[in-house]
Amino acid sequence: MTVETLLTGRRRPLSSSEFIDWIAFHSLEPFSDTYRPSCIVAATLANIHRTRQTAFSSDDFMPVERVTGKQMKPEEMKARMASVAALLPQQDT
């Protein structure tokens, strides 16, 4: 869904450039975690029936790569933005 759709209510197909923009945005600010509720249920059930000493957490059941939480240095951020910019279509000015 585009911002235009949210603001105007008009629905139209997502263009390839908008799709690339959303991918770039997601790499910088990941969207909400749709797996989290299922992982909480899985961890609860596993903890009810666990035989090990330590409890399971919902992170133990996440099917996606975990985020490290490490803060990027300015040089790393600049390199990431350059790689995202390379994915975007070139515009004639």
Image: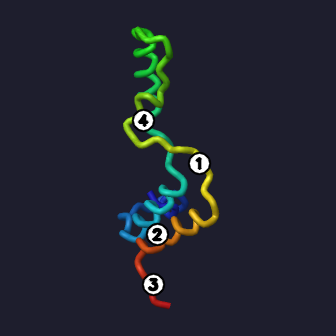
Three-letter code for the amino acid on which mark 1 is drawn: Lys
Which one is closest to the eye, mark 2 or mark 4? 2
Q: Give the distance between the C-alpha atoms of the residues marked 2 and 3, in whole angstroms.
A: 16 Å
Q: Residue 59, relative to residue 52: is it above or below? A: below
Other-residue count near label 1 (Cα within 10 Å), few / some / many at <14 / 14–19 / ≥20:
few
Q: Earlier in the sequence, mark 4 or mark 3?
A: 4
Discs 1, 2 touching: Cβ within 8 Å: no
Which residue has dot 3 on it? 91
Residue name at image x 41 percent, y 34 percent: 62
Which residue has dot 2 on it? 83
Give the structural element (helix, strand or loop) at label 3.
loop
Which one is closest to the eye, mark 1 or mark 2? 1
Give the structural element (helix, strand or loop) at label 2.
helix
Three-letter code for the amino acid on which mark 2 is drawn: Ser
Q: Residue 60, relative to residue 76: is it above or below? A: above
Q: Quadrant of residue 60?
A: top left
Residue name at image x 40 percent, y 29 percent: 61
Q: Give the distance between the C-alpha atoms of the residues marked 1 and 2, in whole angstroms.
A: 19 Å
Three-letter code for the amino acid on which mark 3 is drawn: Gln
Q: Earlier in the sequence, mark 2 or mark 4?
A: 4
Q: Earlier in the sequence, mark 3 or mark 1?
A: 1
Q: Residue 74, relative to residue 63: is it above or below? A: below
Residue 52 circle label? none
Q: Give the distance between the C-alpha atoms of the residues marked 1 and 4, in whole angstroms.
A: 22 Å
Residue 35 circle label? 4
